[in-house]
Image: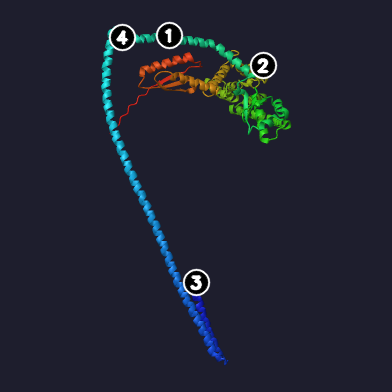
Amino acid sequence: MEVLQYLLIAAVALVVGWFAGNQIAAKKAKGEQVDLEKTREEADAIMTQARREAETLRERTAQAESAAIAEAERKAEKEFSRRRSEIDRTEGRLRKREEQLEKTEEKLQRKLDGATAKEEQAESRLLDIEEDRKALEALRTTMVQKAEAISGMTAEQARKSLLENLEDEVRQESAAIVRRVESETKEQAEKKARQIITLAVQRVASDHVSESTVSVVTLPNDEIKGRIIGREGRNIRTLEQLTGVNLIVDDTPEAVVLSSFDPMRREIARRVLEALISDGRIHPGRIEELVNKIEHQVLESAREAAENACIELGINDLHPELVKLMGRLKFRTSYGQNVLAHSVECGHIAEIISSELGLDARLAKRATFLHDIGKAVSHEMEGTHAAIGANLAKKYRERSEVVHAIEAHHYEVEPRTLTAIIVITADAISASRPGARRESLESYIKRLEALEGIANGFEGVEKSFAIQAGREVRIIVEPDRLNDDQCALLARDVTKKIETDLQYPGQIKVTVLREVRKTEYAR
């Protein structure tokens, strides 16, 4: 840029000189009197100045060129040094990589030598084992001969004697099975008594099983507990009076417990409490407002659930009061099984059975769907839920066959019709299928641990597994310690131990697994 500026100044000076000469010539032409000598001196001065500036410009241009060349040389030298250092580092990494490869190759060679030595040792051990096997076989033959000489019986005779002893033992076990069947028949009365007691406890007892009588409401923090209780306990008293549910506020972190027999009341109280916590306004007036609102919502949802169940089963002419009562079963459970879902499932089963037998499927489906309706009010009225349900069906003018099937589905009266038998069968199938009903998790885990503990206590057992909800025990034995015959005896011993030490419904299957694997390699 500086070079261009100086060139421009020189050009301007030349133009000015030329213009001044033209002006002088013009003045001469016009006859004006001008000092020609003075004008020439001025022009010479301008030319001299222009030459000095041009010389200065050439010097500066030369200096700039030499500086640019020096800078370019420095940059080139710097780039060369950087490239050289990169090449040196790359060569260093390559040398280290070569050293690592050499070490790896040495390790592989040592492992290969070790594997070859182990292979030779294994072949030697196989030869020794084969010789030991032959020696043991000879010893076994000698011992059998000595045993035959001492006992006075051949091996075939001894086997026959053992089978006869086993036959006697099996007959004794058969007799024990017969006695067990007889005792089970006698125990049916005790089971029926336990069932009646359970139903009575579910209706009126105050200390009921927590799994079916309490609901836990999670709190965002423990500070909300004080607001739920209210000043002098007015909030908690209002909630308990309006819902009929006991509210338990204890040291459990971030949780309160709702306790009541009536599952619908518990559901209303749970929803009210959750709404109060979410809203933040907790006082008696707000509690009363929410109880009235949510009670209506719960009743409406129960009625809709019953109507959907009727639509699913194709029952369209059920009395509205019966529909409401069936809806209350949405919040009722029996051994963890939802009663409304159980009733719908029973209805489908009864329809299939009656259709296969050529009977009235609509009648059987209707009676089966209503068979547990007494449970909706069994805690409010006296009597068994079967009798209460039959009275309700009679009150709302159900057919006599339906009334009889409801009252007979637990053999409280003798079933007199095929429809009643189908209701009993469908109820048993729905309740007994795997996964329909549950027991407490703690007792379930203890029962499985007891089964596995018995199996693991026997010699030669590697591990055991209780499967099928405790209905089967699979035992894996060490194949080197037990042979097939010993596995059969182990299964019988484990079975007897279970029968002696445990109490359980039904039967438990014991399976013993023995696996032998032989592996060779072709080279």
Marks 2, 1: nearer the viewer: 1
Residue at image mark 2: 382
Residue 446, percent from left and from top: 51, 21
Q: CA distance from mark 2 to mark 4?
A: 71 Å
Q: Are the residues flagged by discs 4 and 3 in contact, CB closer than 8 Å?
A: no
Within 10 Å of the Cα at label 1, are there few (<14), some (14-19), or many (20+) other Cα atoms? few
Residue at image mark 4: 157
Give whichever of 217, 307 is nearer the camera: 217
For badge 2, the amino acid type reads Glu
Q: CA distance from mark 3 to mark 2?
A: 117 Å
For badge 4, the amino acid type reads Gln
Residue at image mark 1: 172
Marks 2, 4: nearer the viewer: 4
Would residue 469 be seen by someone viewing this image from the given angle?
A: yes
Up the image or down, 522 lies above or below 391; here it is below
For badge 3, the amino acid type reads Glu
Residue 340, percent from left and from top: 60, 25
Decide which of tag 4 and tag 3 comes sooner along the chain.
Answer: 3
Of all residues shown, which one is farthest toward the right?
A: 285
The circle drawn on residue 2 is 3
Residue 201, percent from left and from top: 62, 17
